[in-house]
Amino acid sequence: MIKSNISPFTANLARKILLIINISKQEHPRVALFQTVSWLFYTFEGRFFAFLVGWKKSYLGRGSRVIGTSSIDMGNRSCIGRYAWIEAVTKNNDHLFSPSIKIGNQFFASERLHISAINQIEIGDNCLFGSSVYICDHNHGAYKGNEQSHPAEPPINRKLVSYGPVIIGCNVWVGDNVTILGAIRIGNGVVVGANSVVTHDVPDNVIIGGVPAIILKKFNADSGIWEVCSHDFS
């Protein structure tokens, strides 16, 4: 097997260039020119936006919000689509937190990525996320242990509570509309099927899916095949 060293960022750039070439072949010259100029403008805008928040050689899509940038560390050559909301929450309802969000190199995410942390969220290198992925390490309120929240208290007034960090390994592919809730650890090489809700630790090199997500396949390194092995995490 030949292993490609092309990053998702570079691959996306190549796709855009091919798209421009195709547009120039099938559209009137003025339309092709307008779409090409628009793409160049959006590319410059996204790169400049990423530069402002301290992300080197990266791209941040239009309409995105990044809050608590001093507590957010983004790796190089990453690309995040439009309307992302990434927030390291340092204060809520007079409660103070010391959050940390760390994302590795060559991270690629489609539109509407939402990451929120009051504790710790880490994502490894070379991860690919689909649209509308939600990752959170906390709840509005406490629902186990001592001093649990009362249902008469409005949810927006309940204290944010974290039971531990969210740690995601390298080379992880997360499909569209996935929710990942901490405390949780997801291993390297994991594939998370679309529309899944992940609430338990996940070992390396497995495919998971469902609500809640269960293991569907596991990679056999000897045979080079993903083998069916459906079971939950209990």
Image (cartoon, helix red, strand yellow):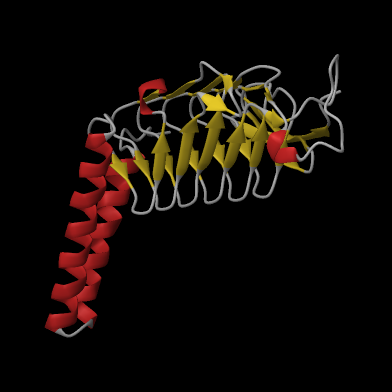
Q: Position of residue 143 (x, y in %)?
A: 83, 26
Would you say 60 lies left or right of 224 here? left
12 in relation to 213, above or below: below
Residue at (61% x, 29% y) in the render: 93
The image quadrant that residue 188 belongs to is: top right
Q: Position of residue 49 (x, y in %)?
A: 26, 43
Residue at (40% x, 38% y) in the render: 66
Residue at (30% x, 56% y) in the render: 15
Q: Position of residue 147 (x, y in %)?
A: 84, 17
Residue at (38% x, 32% y) in the render: 3
Q: Nearer the viewer, residue 103 or 164?
A: 164
62 in relation to 88, above or below: below
Would you say 147 lies left or right of 25 here? right
Q: Nearer the viewer, residue 226 or 207?
A: 207
Q: Nearer the viewer, residue 87 or 1?
A: 87
Would you say 172 lies left or right of 165 here? left
The image quadrant that residue 214 belongs to is: top right
Viewport quadrant of the N terminus: top left
Report the residue that reaches farthest toward the bottom.
28
